Amino acid sequence: MREVDMPGKYDSASVEAGRYDKWVQEKRFKPSGNDKARPYSIVIPPPNVTGKLHLGHAWDTTLQDMLIRQKRMQGFDTLWLPGMDHAGIATQAKVEQRLAEQGLSRYDLGREKFIDQVWDWKNEYASTIKQQWGKLGLSLDYDRERFTLDEGLSTAVRKVFVTLYNKGLIYRGEYIINWDPKARTALSDIEVIHQDDEGAFYHVKYPFVDANDSYDGKNYIEIATTRPETMFGDVAVAVHPSDERYKDLVGKKVLVPLVGREIPIIADEYVDPEFGSGMVKITPAHDPNDFLVGNRHDLERINTMNDDASMNENAGKYNGMDRFEARKAIVADLEAAGWMLHIEPIVHSVGHSERTGVQVESRLSTQWFVKMKPLAEQALAMQASDDRVDFYPPRFEGTFTRWMEDIHDWVISRQLWWGHQIPAWYNKQTGAMYVGEEAPEDIENWEQDPDVLDTWFSSALWPFSTMGWPDEDSADFKRYFPTNTLVTGYDIIFFWVARMMFQSKEFTGRRPFNNVLIHGLIRDEQGRKMSKSLGNGIDPMDVIEKYGADALRWFLTNGSTPGQDLNFSYAKMDASWNFINKIWNASRYVIMNLNEDTKAELPAYDTLTLADKWILSRLNDTIAKVTKNFEKFEFGEADRALYNFIWNDFADWYIEMTKETLNGDNEAAKDAVQHVLAYVLDQTLRLLHPILPFVTEAIWLELPVHAGETLVDAAYPEVHAELTNDTAEADFASLVALITSIRTIRNEANAPMSTKIDVLVKTEDANLKRIFEENADYINRFVHPKELQIAADIEAPKLSMSAVISGAEIFVPLEELIDLDEEIARLEGELKKFTGEVKRGAGKLGNAKFVNNAPEAVVAEEREKLADWQTKLAATEARLADLKAAK
């Protein structure tokens, strides 16, 4: 045996050490530069520079790496472009939290110094993320790395903003928006998470101004509100125009309790007469629907809160109080003054900031908006064209379509300091506004809008801005855009996928990517979402430390089904490691049994044994399955095909069968089997490399002819039709069935391999007899018979154990070991099984609808199955009768 640098047990740390750095230093991940090759590109969904990568990132990027590695090996000119997102509100919140621990706020530092602090944070975590990418083995082209605040992307952002503004698709206006009082910024609708909170309906008296007015015998009307702190912004009470109960009240006035302001009762169709009392208070500065009502009736807008959700001067004595503390005080005062009728506890859905978790306020504010309807219509039209984006699974296109059809204008301004500052300036003397890609020439007379753009505004441009756009002559843009595949989770279809689609269509006239692969979320072993509150988060770097990157990658892909969630478990990680250890040990055995000059090339086909032909046909089938399932993004199915081939076909059967030849004296046969082993191992490692890059490279370099090379850009396996051999597969299956049946008999008789047994094989099938005789050496190796007889006229011994396979009966005389009653019981169990199969098959073929409508090949296959079960049934009945007679 050859000496190899492969310990007897797989050690991920030594296998992975230094390997990634070598790939990067050798520029292995750059595009090929071959203009004749078909381009294939992916842009990484840029992780936020808010912290370390989590398991979801590991899953997402592993799937991308598999795709790009396979395409690179298939000869495509591949580009996988890395980058990160500045993540405005999320990153600013992290830095503000760090400052708060030092007793500082951003206002203490001022904008410029605060931004310096955020850049320090970005550099720290960007470095960590890149280290994690390396640990995962991601084949990224770092020479093209981008950041959403770099100069090129900033140019693209300004170009898009100004173009949309000039087309009337960006506008500035005063509207009710979602407000995060902790981050002190506006939020878009999809940055608001609704959750059930405990609250109450406060039923309050609103007295009539005119002492002569009344309703239902009372001098007040009853108004229910969940937010009494907004009463200071009440400017009307509304009823539905067709509500007969209140038609006489329209035009009358009531007083706002604790405020004393007179407000009218108005009629508006917004009111639902079936909900509650059918009367609602109108607070235009604190509710989006009330805002629209106020516009229709020309009502005043009174804002009662500051940007941190404390009450302002319009709240009277409650000025300066936190909104929730003010609520308690107001309720107490309403009760003390006799205005409170009753309090009804409820649980209701309340919006919370996705980033900070605090309860969102609906707040009147002047913001910048994108007019979405024209852009959405354009994106929907694109999906009906040849330039459509294909979703995997397809059902997620419905999610995209429904959102685009019900789109609202997008509030894009954020009251932050970290981000793309809005390219709008206001003249200090005249107040005139200027919007442009560059600042005004007389800049000293202008002041730039202090707000920044929503993070998703720049992220929406990612597939083309990273390629050099708006320079449409950029080499990368011309060659690699549109990109081929986007891989992302279903939780950001609204946030990101949809926005990339409508912005790409608007500015490039093309789809941003051909395909979008949607995966689910990684959950814990119990199926729960991983979160800090549950303490069930898993750091992928900890998993890599224990099991290695390849084991994590195998787990992430083995359980990967498009659109479905994935549950993490350490038991599954153990199984992943065990599989890689199996690959390692099988490969080690093969390499140790090769000569120094053994090439991964096949000898002449007609010199191959049945086992050789069988394993090559199984390899061909595996290549076909893996390649097909990669194309469909069914990575779990690809992994299963690989697992079955490597563990069952290659390691458990073929390698075991080669031992007889490798230990024998026939040098020609030994040389042939060495070449087949080298070829199959070489091709298998190539198939595995996109999934398990580290261990496959380490093993492949130990093969005699691969020293100093790399698998990264080695050719990916292809199906060779001449190696597909259905006859060899069927013949070998019969041999396996024979060996397996004899082993089963040994186990049931508790007869170890050291126990001498005779094996009698009765068959009238000449081809089957030939197969067994030509491969008697394999039978001898696997079942250790004292004597092996194969004939058509074998008499079944009275006391023996038996088995029935297709075309043959097997008898093992075991006079000293067999328990006659147990053997009869076992055969009766077999008889029951075979009877059931015959009944099922006969019933199916007796069904005229099936016979007449099913494909001819399917019906023929069912007839063959039935004949086989009938043969097995007859043989078992005869054997059972013999044993009962002997008893």
Image (cartoon, helix red, strand yellow):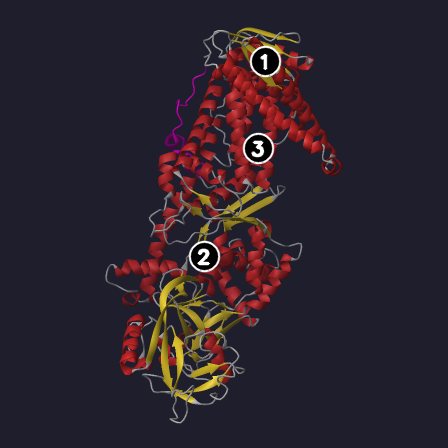
* Extreme-top residue of the structure: 787
Q: Which residue is tagged 3? A: 715
- Crowding around mark 1 (Cα neighbors within 10 Å: few <14, some 14 to 19, many 20+) is many
Q: Is residue 811 above or below residue 362?
A: above
Q: Are marks 1 and 3 in contact (CB under 8 Å)?
A: no
Query: Alpha carbon of mark 1 to alpha carbon of mark 3: how far?
Result: 46 Å
Nearest to the observer: residue 557 or residue 806: 806
Comes first in the chain, label 3 or label 2: 2
x, y percent for residue 347 = 39, 65
x, y percent for residue 125 = 36, 50
Quadrant (top left, top right, bottom left, bottom right) of the C terminus: top right
What residue span does the magenta drawing correspond to?
A: 1-25
x, y percent for residue 111 = 34, 66
Comes first in the chain, label 2 or label 1: 2
When asked about the image quadrant of residue 122, the answer is bottom left
Tell me the residue at 47%/89% (across/down): 251
Instruction: Indicate which disc residue 810 carries.
Output: 1
Query: Alpha carbon of mark 2 to alpha carbon of mark 1: how far?
Result: 71 Å
Q: Which residue is tagged 2? A: 148
Question: Amino acid type of disc 3?
Answer: Ala
When asked about the image quadrant of residue 401, the answer is bottom right
Query: Alpha carbon of mark 3 to alpha carbon of mark 2: how far?
Result: 35 Å
Can residue 657 be spotted in the picture?
Answer: no
Tell me the residue at 57%/12% (across/down): 883
Comes first in the chain, label 1 or label 3: 3
Q: Secondary structure at mark 1?
A: strand
Question: Amino acid type of disc 2?
Answer: Thr
Q: Secondary structure at mark 2?
A: loop
Q: Are marks 2 and 1 in contact (CB under 8 Å)?
A: no
